[in-house]
Amino acid sequence: MGYEKFNILKSTTVPLSIENVDTDQIIPARFLKATERIGFGENLFRDWRYNADNSIKKEFVLNNDTYNGKILLGGKNFGSGSSREHAAWAIYDYGFRCVISSFFADIFRGNCLNIGVLPVQVSSEFLNKIFECVFKNPKTELVVDLNTQKVNIPCLGISESFDINEYKKENMLNGYDDIDFLTNMKDTISEFAKNTPL
């Protein structure tokens, strides 16, 4: 199952300036029964978005119409805790295509890359500048360029580079998951097998 190609993303952001956001906060364990990737977005940050009686917590940023966009800004150590891939599914299904933080848990980072969410790790200083701009002007747009591996803050005229595994980068540029990648190489694999003695 592939996903949207990621090349250059220009978008406003949703600022979640909370550190140590773990996967149980991203998608609580009681919502992990489904095995397909769809339908998890409605329960993204469920316990932070809703009260016990299902009324909306107006103070939570996802419930604030002031902020929107395809980029989620997170505090340091985003995606810690258990290895559930459903956390990445929920972020994608909600509509986010990129999460920016100053540090990601490794397993969460991998789960995001597997399903088309780009985890962009920047310095704490650069992240703070983004938060400052967004809080000052919620219409602030960022430009995330996967080809050049840079995040740009056009209103400040500054940018910062980020790292990504080359294989995962190519997959995201093409909208491939691991199965798509292998399927796309079917002819190459067949040719290699045909010309390689047993």
Image (tube, rainbow, N blue to C red):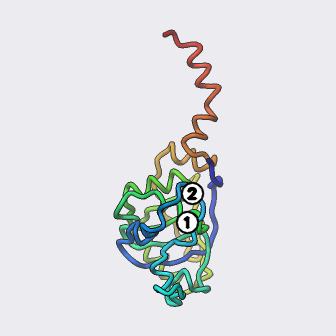
SS at mark 2 in the image: loop
> What distance separates the C-alpha of mark 1 from that of mark 2?
7 Å
Viewed as shown, does residue 106 lie left or right of 171?
Answer: left
* Residue 120 vs residue 70, the one in the foreground: 70
Tag on residue 40? 1
Picture coordinates of residue 130 (x, y %)?
A: 49, 76
- Near mark 1 (Cα within 10 A), the count class, few <14, some 14-19 or many ≥20, is many
Disc 2 residue type (three-letter): Arg
SS at mark 1 in the image: loop
Residue 74, image quadrant: bottom left
Q: Residue at x 59, y 82 (%)?
A: 67
Picture coordinates of residue 153 (x, y %)?
A: 55, 71
Task: Note whether 19 is above or below 2 in the view shown.
Answer: below
Q: Are marks 1 and 2 in contact (CB under 8 Å)?
A: yes
Which residue is identified by label 2? 37
- Near mark 2 (Cα within 10 A), the count class, few <14, some 14-19 or many ≥20, is some
* Residue 90 vs residue 73, the one in the foreground: 90
Q: Residue at x 57, y 57 (%)?
A: 37
Disc 1 residue type (three-letter): Phe
Task: Note whether 164 is above or below 73 in the view shown.
Answer: above
Task: Note whether 58 is above or below 40 in the view shown.
Answer: below
Q: Residue at x 54, y 87 (%)?
A: 56
* Residue 161 vs residue 107, the one in the foreground: 107
Picture coordinates of residue 106 (x, y %)?
A: 37, 55
Q: Residue furthest top?
A: 197
Picture coordinates of residue 157 (x, y %)?
A: 56, 72
Q: Residue at x 43, y 62 (%)?
A: 121
